[in-house]
Image (cartoon, grey):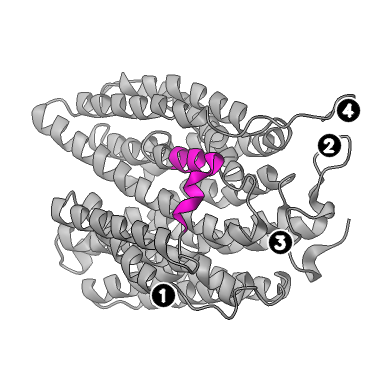
């Protein structure tokens, strides 16, 4: 098999990407593995940053003499920038090519990180975080699109496992590393540490990501009306859900409805094509991605708060206690990718949800003195379930799509993930706040009550999981092994 380090990404429909007649999945050749490593280095920068900043907010409020409400904009501004830039990413890839958009995103993120480290006030830090979010928001969908196009359908499950590595390394390394930096050289190094990694990622990308042929849509104009509707819609919806502001959420919903009507009627190519959701695999994968942010990833929202507010642990200790979840995911990733390529997404996702339910039930019954060993075991199983119920979904989202549709499909699926994360944070945060107010002397019970909603969302995910593509059928007389 040829080395793709010096060639354009292989079309998913090309003979080179297809499995052999015995239906044995095509191997991951050296060129594809090298491309995956380059992409992972870039993706790791933005994901580490998101997890490190969470442990620094209290110190930032103290150093800048700002209220918690103001300093929260350090995270909110970053999230809003991501929501606004995601719709542009698909068009930019078609217009300029994935390599140059990837270099642009890494450069903006690295420059924003350096500026964040020099911030002199809460306002300047928030502004620089928005700039950082513009680059960071493009990195995740770009990493998926680059590898999805290069891998082809027969290797996509295994390659999506590679893309998931930084997402799982970040929760392991991010909070402890952030805590060490805050307690050591100071919070500014949370941002400065991104600079050498970002520069390395830029150099590796310039050397190792092939320049694709001139995109077919290189001469096309952006969907200006669509961008003018969708980016503000996502920003308003994200902010409204994040802050539980009904007017902003309503305005975002109205703008989103207007964008949908525009996209269905436009004669050009919309920035995000709603017709993608008419494809059953894509619609099912989108629904699962949305629900996973409210269920399987619920532990990442609730458990750090439980450890700090109920068990009175420090932010560093809470971060360390979350490591079993990420270890579980890391342990499952290699197996999940191979199994998905062999049997399809549906059985793997169903197994993952089945494993997540008992782990969620353990958390729904926890109290102030619940064994931390038991909780660690539940988080480990939760991590196994996270890999099994999310990685195959990303592979299934591209099922049956033409290579030209992958960039916009990636933007659409990442948009769903971002909105889902906002909805999950808002819903679980609001439920927890109400339960805490109802039971002021029993915070552990408030967390347990909130986890029952996580159990419900997890069970609801079974419905779209059943709509994922069926396992591939081998020709009669052949074997997939």
Indicate the secondary structure of the residue bearing disc 4.
Answer: loop
Q: Say if the magenta span includes residue 155.
A: no
* Residue 286 screen position, x and y as percent: 47, 43
Left or right of 370 on screen, residue 374: right
Residue 478's tag is 4
Indicate the secondary structure of the residue bearing disc 1.
Answer: helix
State the CA–CA distance, disc 4 to disc 2.
Answer: 10 Å
First in sequence, mark 2 or 3: give its number. 2
Which residue has dot 3 on it?
35
Image position of 403 with respect to 94: above or below: above
Which residue has dot 1 on it?
112
Left or right of 322 on screen, residue 90: right
Give the overall secondary structure of the magenta segment: helix
- The reply to whether dot 4 and dot 2 touch (C-beta < 8 Å) is no
Residue drawn at point x = 23 percent, y = 26 percent: 444
Image position of 412 with respect to 341: above or below: below
Query: Which portion, as a residue range, is magenta?
Result: 273-289
- The reply to whether dot 1 and dot 3 touch (C-beta < 8 Å) is no
């Amino acid at each position: 098999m040829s080395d793709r380090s010096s060639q354009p990404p292989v079309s998913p429909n090309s003979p080179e990407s297809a499995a052999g007649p015995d239906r044995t999945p095509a191997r991951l050749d050296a060129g594809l593995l090298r491309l995956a490593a380059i992409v992972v280095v870039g993706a790791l920068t933005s994901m580490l940053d998101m997890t490190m900043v969470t442990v620094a907010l209290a110190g930032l409020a103290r150093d800048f003499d700002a209220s918690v409400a103001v300093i929260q904009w350090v995270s909110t501004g970053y999230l809003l920038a991501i929501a606004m830039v995601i719709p542009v990413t698909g068009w930019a890839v078609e217009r300029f090519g994935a390599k140059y958009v990837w270099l642009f995103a890494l450069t903006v993120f690295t420059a924003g990180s350096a500026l964040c480290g020099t911030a002199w006030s809460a306002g300047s830090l928030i502004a620089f975080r928005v700039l950082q979010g513009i680059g960071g928001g493009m990195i995740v969908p770009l990493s998926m699109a680059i590898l999805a196009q290069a891998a082809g359908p027969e290797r996509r499950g295994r390659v999506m496992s590679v893309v998931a590595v930084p997402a799982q390394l970040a929760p392991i390394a991010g909070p402890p590393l952030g805590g060490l930096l805050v307690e050591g050289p100071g919070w500014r190094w949370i941002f400065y540490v991104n600079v050498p990694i970002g520069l390395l990622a830029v150099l590796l990308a310039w050397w190792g990501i092939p320049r694709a042929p001139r995109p077919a849509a290189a001469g096309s104009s952006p969907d200006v009306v669509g961008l003018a509707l969708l980016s503000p819609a996502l920003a308003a919806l994200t902010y409204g859900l994040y802050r539980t502001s009904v007017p902003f959420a309503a305005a975002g919903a109205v703008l989103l409805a207007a964008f949908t009507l525009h996209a269905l009627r436009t004669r050009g190519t919309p920035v995000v094509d709603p017709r993608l959701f008419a494809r059953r695999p894509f619609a099912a994968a989108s629904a699962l991605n949305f629900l996973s942010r409210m269920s399987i990833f619920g532990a990442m929202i609730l458990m750090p708060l439980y450890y700090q507010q109920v068990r009175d642990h420090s932010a560093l200790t809470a971060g360390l206690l979350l490591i079993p979840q990420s270890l579980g995911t890391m342990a499952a990733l290699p197996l999940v990718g191979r199994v998905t390529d062999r049997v399809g997404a549906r059985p793997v996702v169903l197994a993952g949800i089945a494993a997540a339910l008992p782990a969620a039930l353990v958390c729904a019954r926890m109290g102030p003195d619940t064994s931390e060993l038991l909780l660690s075991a539940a988080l480990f199983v939760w991590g196994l379930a996270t890999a099994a119920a999310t990685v195959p979904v990303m592979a299934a989202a591209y099922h049956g799509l033409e290579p030209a549709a992958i960039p916009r499909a990636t933007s659409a699926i990442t948009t769903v993930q971002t909105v889902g994360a906002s909805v999950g944070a808002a819903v679980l945060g609001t439920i927890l706040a109400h339960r805490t107010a109802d039971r002021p002397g029993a915070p552990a019970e408030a967390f347990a009550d909130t986890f029952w909603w996580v159990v419900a969302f997890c069970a609801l995910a079974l419905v779209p999981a059943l709509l994922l593509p069926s396992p591939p059928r081998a020709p009669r007389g052949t074997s997939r092994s």
